[in-house]
Image: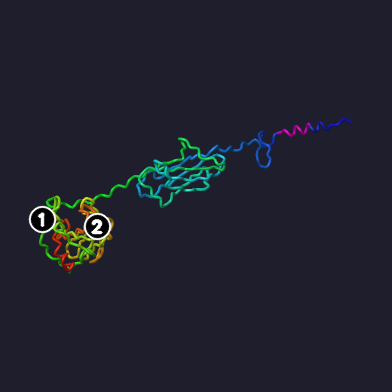
């Protein structure tokens, strides 16, 4: 008898190489993975495909900018990242923000610390990244992983118009040496503390370079409270570096205006439009503006409105003596 097993084996071999119904290129599978399918090869190092700071230009005192970043690294799902802000030149760190694990390929927004105040100058925001293999950011001209910030100086506040000198347009034509007494009750002395009226140079009408003295100087220690002689409304609070310094103008209920000058810088405790009572604090004695350097209150009384058409200053010393009980 002849054996036909080899023929059977040949038939089975022919069946084994017949393509499956899915197509001639269908691959054999084992464990759910296709033989021959290429696995993604991780990039050698991560790159910062985006790193921006907004705004790039700001003014000293503004809130810190917001940083936007995106890290790319094929074959890696997340990396560890941190941000460092350095001041230029010198690269002195001024802020650090550890971000921990950051997903790759996704835009990430970072808010720098709320209390970070950047002074005038130039800064660099630098992104530092480490992948799971310990490899750091690859930097290039297209993807530097850095962003610059410029912090500009604040614009100076506008200075108030200088008080016009006698004879200038808008200035009173002459001083009024003999004032009429106030129509109100006796006023409160404007310096709430030890004081001195000084010498002849502190008097109303004393000579000054280019003008005459329009008030009475009251010498007192720096920080002594300056108070309102009468109730009224605050019509002006300003700072005049080359002149009156920090000053307050009071439109009082007795129909006159009162001017308090050379107050301690940033000591004014009332706002324009505020109503005050007699004896209420306005500012503190200082020596701001153009002075001899001695701490004192420059005090003026105006009839007809402070530097208003037809208004004029009067000698305040008689009433000051009366208010002080001298």
Q: How many marks?
A: 2
Q: Residues within 10 Å of mark 1 (few under 14, many from 20)?
A: few
Q: Residues within 10 Å of mark 2 (few under 14, many from 20)?
A: many
User: In this orientation, which residue lies closer to the viewer: 240 or 44?
Assistant: 240
Q: In the image, is 144 to the left or to the right of 320?
A: right
Residue 312 visible in rendering: no
Identify the residue shown where x is 69% and y is 40%. 30
Q: In the image, is 171 to the left or to the right of 118?
A: left
Q: Secondary structure at mark 2?
A: loop
Q: Quadrant of residue 264?
A: bottom left
Residue 222 image offset from top left, x and y in percent: 25, 59
Residue 105 image offset from top left, x and y in percent: 51, 42
Query: Is the stretch drawn in magenta largely helix, strand or loop?
Result: helix
Residue 214 image offset from top left, x and y in percent: 15, 57
Q: Which residues are magenta?
A: 10-18
Q: Is residue 16 magenta?
A: yes
On the image, numbered disc 2 is attached to which residue? 286
Identify the residue shown where x is 40% and y is 48%. 64
Quarter of the picture holding the C terminus: bottom left
In the image, which is nearer the foreground, mark 1 or mark 2? Answer: 2
Residue 154 visible in rendering: yes
Q: Quadrant of residue 276?
A: bottom left
Quarter of the picture holding the N terminus: top right
On the image, numbered disc 1 is attached to which residue? 174
Which of disc 2 and disc 1 is earlier in sequence?
1
Q: In the image, is 151 to the left or to the right of 317?
A: right
Q: Secondary structure at mark 1?
A: loop
Residue 126 image offset from top left, x and y in percent: 45, 42
- Distance from Cα at disc 1 to Cα at disc 2: 28 Å
User: In this orientation, which residue lies closer to the viewer: 312 or 320?
Assistant: 320
Q: Which mark is residue 20?
A: none
């Amino acid at each position: 008898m002849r054996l036909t097993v080899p023929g059977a084996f040949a038939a089975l071999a022919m069946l084994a190489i017949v393509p499956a119904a899915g197509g001639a290129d269908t691959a054999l599978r084992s464990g759910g993975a296709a033989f021959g399918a290429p696995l993604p090869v991780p990039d050698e190092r991560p790159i910062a495909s985006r790193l921006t700071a907004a705004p790039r230009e700001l003014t000293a005192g503004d809130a810190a900018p917001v940083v936007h970043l995106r890290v790319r690294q094929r074959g890696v799902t997340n990396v560890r990242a941190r941000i460092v802000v350095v001041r230029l030149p010198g690269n002195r760190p001024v802020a650090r923000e550890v971000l921990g694990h950051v997903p790759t390929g996704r835009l990430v927004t970072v808010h720098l610390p709320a209390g970070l105040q950047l002074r005038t100058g130039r800064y660099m925001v630098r992104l530092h990244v480490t992948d799971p293999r310990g490899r750091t950011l690859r930097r290039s001209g297209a993807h530097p992983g850095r962003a610059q910030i410029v912090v500009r100086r604040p614009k100076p506040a506008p200075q108030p118009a200088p008080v016009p000198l006698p004879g200038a347009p808008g200035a009173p034509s002459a001083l009024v040496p003999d004032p009429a007494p106030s129509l109100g009750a006796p006023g409160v002395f404007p310096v709430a503390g030890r004081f001195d009226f000084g010498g002849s140079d502190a008097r109303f009408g004393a000579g000054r370079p280019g003008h005459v003295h329009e008030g009475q100087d009251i010498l007192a220690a720096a920080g002594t409270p300056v108070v309102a002689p009468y109730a009224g409304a605050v019509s002006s609070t300003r700072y005049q570096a080359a002149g009156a310094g920090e000053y307050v103008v009071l439109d009082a209920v007795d129909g006159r205006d009162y001017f308090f000058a050379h107050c301690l810088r940033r000591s004014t405790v009332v706002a324009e439009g505020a109503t005050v009572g007699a004896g209420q604090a306005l500012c503190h004695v200082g020596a701001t503006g153009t002075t001899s350097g001695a701490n004192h209150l420059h005090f003026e009384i105006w009839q007809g409105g402070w530097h208003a058409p037809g208004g004029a200053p009067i000698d305040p010393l008689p009433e000051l003596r009366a208010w002080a009980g001298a």
